[in-house]
Amino acid sequence: MADKRSHLSARVRGLRVSINHFRVLLAGDAFAFVSLALLVIIIGIAVIGPAYMSDFATALDLSLRNAPPFTDENGWLFWLGADALGRPLIARLIVAAQPTLLIATSAVIAAMLAGGILGLAAGYFGGLADNVIMRMADVLMSFPSLLLAIFALYVLGPSIPAVVIVLGITRMPIYIRVARAESLSIREQLFIESARAAGARRRRIIGVHITPLILPTLLTVATLDFANVMLAESALSFLGLGIQPPELSWGLMVAAGRDYLTSAWWVSLWPGFAILLTALSANLVSNWLRIAMDPRLRWRLERRWGDSDVE
Amino acid sequence: MAEFLGRRALHSAIAMLSLILFVFVIVRLSGNPALLYLPESASDELIREFNERYGLNEPILVQFGRYLWDIAHLDFGMSIRRHIPAIEAVVLAYPWTLFLSGITLVLSMLIAMTFGPLAAYRPGSVFDRSVTVLALFAASTPGFWLAITAILVFAIELGWLPTSGVGGPRYWVMPVAIMMLEITGTTTQVVRGSMVTSLASPYVKAARAKGMPERRVVFVHALRNSLIAAVTVAGDQTRGLINGAVVVETIFGWPGIGKLMIDAIVQRDFAVLQAAVLTTAFAIFLLNLIIDIIYAVLDPRIRFR
């Protein structure tokens, strides 16, 4: 028992050391730091914002149709202007943040779980399972994702679960490949052999020894993928095949503003800006994370930290 | 080589077949396939007649056989809006997409092969980091939004370029530029990564040691070895091009395959949508096959993997 506790505290200490290390690395990279802060703010808004804003976001006021931005005369809610039905864009942007982020996150998690399990199975068991799974991944990989999504959503009808599933399926191959490659190399390691020699069952080997080692890599890929999935959902919604009104998403808002491009550019400009800002922050963070997680590349961040000391 | 070819062709055939199966299954999953082909106002009588004529009452395996047979004969049914065979509408649209994608691909390769090596020349330099940030920007920008913003600025406000349609060179500027956004960033990053490795190799040192001009060392010796990486992504990027074409063509009214698909969806013209998706899939699998054969010719190691 005591032995187990000391083992646990060693792990906690190790975790604390690596978190500290990451903090130092993060402080050294202004881009990554700012974008992580932005991302946290955007997620915070998406989580708590809609509760306060949903009433404003749907309140029609036809006297304020396409009200222009940057004036205080209609109150701060209208500071970014209003849409064609006189609804304040600030409120609508905040309310739309939640579904936009939630759909992208769910699709990424679905793809990561399904792809991770399939890839692990392919790598660990090999043989026929490997062949079938990898061929499937190849087919998905070589086919334009948007085409697949358009076709499936047209036939099945657009709904939020359908969008999540379709996006998840199109992103699966990356996780399959990563999980397969990792488990293939881990399977051959000595500690797996010793676990097997000690009588560990297959389930234990996969669950306790292999999965924890694959998970960080999969999570890194997932953060990298998040922006892609969000852009794909936005494009689908823009084309009218993703989220349907009266639901809200940033892509849909851009589409709604398209008809008023000449008279009210702000209606479609802001939501597009929100997509760009979120995707860029996510990409910068994941780019940094990829380097920070890779011991072979980490020196780049460390050196930069050292350089700024000298300057 | 023959064995490699056979194996690769078999893989492509299996891929194509599983895609057809996917389309077949998903169409049946939707409930009643006849409703997809027929207008929304179709009467029960019409639906029954359609089911009768196209054998939709027969066992599922017979249906699948018939489906494969029709596809093999490029028979995708009639377009209910255009009153021409669906395949004809698709064939008419293809050249537009091919030209658009071709020009985009060539231009973005040129950019990647200029900026990639320059960024790789001093990894971590201001230029290198700017290129990385720019590439990230490109990868984070929603193309559809940039497209309509560009229309607002360059067509409506400044009046320099036409808002949409096809015609002289001015009609090509915005569609090509937005399509390039989709792929140039990644291609540049890949060339850069491969150039970092190339530039650190002994043969580059040897070339420098014998007094070769630096420009020649970078753009001839090192770049040539990074070309394989560039060509590999170019193959992958065809998918990105098709994805981009759907959005760009819809916004700019470009009469290519992407607009055809979206129009088919809006008009509920299922035969055209299905013909477009399946022929595009076929074209992509064929292209991948050709690329793989080119590799095998270029690099004998690949044949024996």
Image: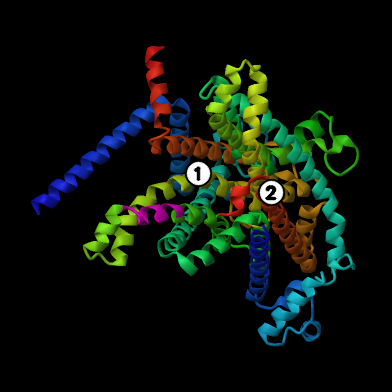
The residue at the point 80 percent across, 49 percent down is B97
Disc 2 residue type? Val
Look at the numbered disc 1 and give the secondary structure of its residue.
helix
The residue at the point 8 percent across, 51 percent down is A2
Does A188 lie within the magenta span? yes
Q: Provide the residue span drawn in magenta.
A: A181-189
- Which label number is shown at residue B297? 2
Q: Residues within 10 Å of mark 1 (few under 14, many from 20)?
A: many
Label 2 marks a residue whose chain is B
| Residue A284 appears left or right of B92 | left
Quadrant position of the N terminus of chain A in the picture: bottom left
Q: Residue furthest top?
A: A311
Task: Out of B99 and B54, give the one closest to the viewer.
Answer: B99
Does B206 lie within the magenta span? no
Q: Are marks 1 and 2 on the same chain?
A: no
Task: Out of A252 and B85, give the one closest to the viewer.
Answer: B85
Look at the numbered disc 2 and give the secondary structure of its residue.
helix
Main SS of the magenta part reads helix
| Residue A186 appears left or right of B5 | left
| Residue A23 appears left or right of A226 | left
Quadrant position of the C terminus of chain A in the picture: top left
Disc 1 residue type? Leu
Task: Out of A109 and A49, give the one closest to the viewer.
Answer: A109
Q: Is residue A139 above or below residue A309?
A: below
Label 1 marks a residue whose chain is A
- Which label number is shown at residue A224? 1
Q: Residue A257: x percent and y percent?
A: 70, 44
| Residue B65 appears left or right of B75 | left
